[in-house]
Amino acid sequence: MHGGKPYVDIALTRFPHEDNLSWLGSQALGVVGRKDRAFLVNYAKRIVNKQNQYVFAEDVERDGLDDAFAADVSITGTPVGTFMEDVSSALTAGGWCWLHVDRGGPETDPATGKPVARSVLEREQAGDRVFWSLWRPDEVVDWRFDKNGQLLWLLSEFEEYDNENPFTEATTRRIRELWERGQVTRFVIKDGKIQSESVTPFPFKGVPFFPAGTASVLPYWFDDVERIQASLLNLESAHDENLIQSVYPQLVIPQDAIENTMLLADLEGPSGYEKAVELVRGLNNPIQEPSESRYVTRYLQPRAQDLKAIPDEILRRRKELYQVVGMGMNNPESRQVASAEAKAWDNLDPSAAIAERARVLDDVERKLVSMSAKIDSGFKVYEPRYPVKFDIPDVAADMAALIQLDNFELPEIARREIRRAAMKVLNQVVSIPKDRMAAIVQALDEWAPDDDLPMPG
């Protein structure tokens, strides 16, 4: 999903018997290898972003949400909307993810070991507040639920970048954390061995994690998207290599032309041969050859049609990729065909699939709020409401249908509904503020086209 050079390094494959100069290049010779010239058209990221655009096209209502918390739910400056978009992206790319609710360490009384009562301001200044974090499937290596469906323990693993001291070199170390009910054990691992271990209790009598989506070892549909994208990456690289090696004309020079040039220019030895070749290739240097020579200096280059095979295959695979997803995005075919594909999501209604994602996100955010309130009694509980009705718009087709309907002999009440629908289509092209749209609809309702008076407003 993230693409970039790390993905190219993994997904780009070497040609059979490809030499190191072609694959890796040579810094000494100034040659850039095919591996470093390859580029990625990130279809996977485009698919993830497109689904998020549909799910979050309308604002999510969050009644009672604290403004300060809404602006930063992660203590790293992530707004609540961006955080939930990240959750949706993780669900699309991985099939499931883990959500974690934590709290800045409360101040405890050394004598009793219990938290010290503090004002809200003192807590905020000390960083004692709830925050949320998203964990990818590969960051949670193992877990266990009890017979009642409650999370018994969870083991996470990640790389920690330590740059706390600006006067020393930053270091990276591997961390494993065993989360149990009421405590977390932190292991610092180096060279496969535990370097240090520490236990930190927390007031929540449970494990502050829960999964979103369904964890499974079975292949996921996004795996197919990635494999098709990898094949497109390799085809693009192969086509780029063909263009470099084949499209540019290859000069064929008769051997006797070089020898004759060496003779006329009084050149000898290997260095003389190289100079003769340069003279023969020079555009302003005439080639001299004996009159009885039957060799002809000429260029070899492939036919333009021969170079279309790979680009045509790229277009075919790209179409199959969007068939896998069920969305005909950026399809070069006609609007009618593209519209038909856009309305098929693996033979299902895409609106239903997007609505299902919205329901999952609604459930996830409600669980986050509920767990936050259990961890911190001062957390301001709110109720999220995600839209559940979605329409995949095709502006051109919708407007054409409205124009055809307007040609029928219809009563004014029906024409009024057509005009309202036209304003909805207009809102898809240019976003219209709600108050202005309400004024437009009111003006349409009051407008009588048969009157001589101009339209209100």
Image (tube, rainbow, N blue to C red):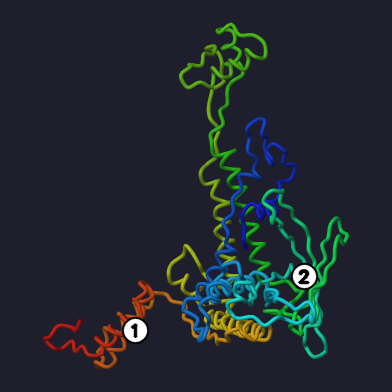
Up the image or down, 391 lies above or below 15; here it is: below
Quarter occupied by the C terminus = bottom left
Which residue occupies the extreme front position in the image?
Answer: 111
Q: Nearer the viewer, mark 1 or mark 2?
A: 2
Neighbour class for label 1 at 10 Å: few (<14), some, many (≥20)? Answer: some
Near-viewer residue (192 or 302): 192
**Residue at point 32%, 80% (across, down):** 423
In primary-sequence order, the first of circles 1 and 2 is 2
- The numbered disc on residue 156 is 2
- The reply to whether residue 423 is in sight is yes
Residue 157 horizontal side relative to residue 430, left or right: right
Residue 38, percent across and down?
61, 48
Quarter occupied by the N terminus = bottom right
- The numbered disc on residue 369 is none
Q: CA distance from mark 1 to mark 2?
A: 51 Å
Near-viewer residue (317 or 214): 214
Up the image or down, 370 lies above or below 121; here it is: below
Local SS, label 1: helix
Residue 109 horizontal side relative to residue 276, left or right: right
Local SS, label 2: strand
- Where does label 1 land, which residue? 421
**Residue at point 59%, 65% (across, down):** 321
Tag 1: residue type?
A: Ala
Neighbour class for label 2 at 10 Å: few (<14), some, many (≥20)? Answer: some
**Residue at point 59%, 47% (across, down):** 239
